[in-house]
Amino acid sequence: MINIIKNNIDFKSFIALKITEYKVLIFKIFKDYTKCIYINQINDHIEINVDKVFDNKLKYKNIDRVLISKRNFISIKDSLSYIQNSIDKNLYK
């Protein structure tokens, strides 16, 4: 799975980590938060969660994580454009 992602995604300044054989984390640290894209292969589908993890709980009234979106796909190849769009959305923020 990680090889398909690395060969087809332009990470720009995001970092990709293989967590397990079936899990990948793509992330970028911004000034006030970290954008995380979690990719999990679960049985016969791919689950993708996009989160903002805030670095300062006090500033954000004890909110430490916000789920931006959650999507399921049949295969990793079906999810590539969604992953790329998630990276591109915050490129200049």
Image (cartoon, rainbow, N blue to C red):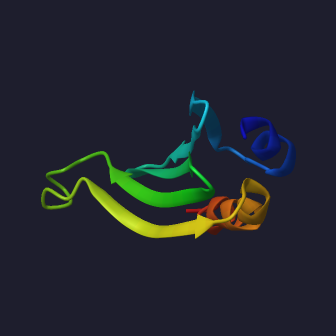
| Residue 82 in picture, x, y percent from top left | 68, 67
Q: Tell me how many marks there are.
A: 0
Work out whether 80 lies above or below 69: above
Q: Is residue 40 left or right of residue 61?
A: right
Residue drawn 30% across and 45% down? 55
Vertically, is 89 above or below 12?
below
Q: Name the residue: 64% across, 44% down.
A: 14
Figure quadrant of the N terminus: top right
Q: Quadrant of residue 51?
A: bottom left
Q: Residue furthest front?
A: 43
Q: Quadrant of the C terminus?
A: bottom right
Q: Position of residue 65 (x, y in %)?
A: 30, 56
Which of 57 and 5 lies nearest the eye of the viewer? 5
Say if residue 63 shows up in the picture. Answer: yes
Point 79% across, 51% down: residue = 9
The front one of 88 and 23 is 23
Q: Is residue 69 left or right of residue 6?
A: left
Taking depth in this image into account, of 93 and 75 the one nearest to the observer is: 75
- Nearer-the-camera pick, 61 or 38: 38
Residue 5, image x, y percentages: 76, 45
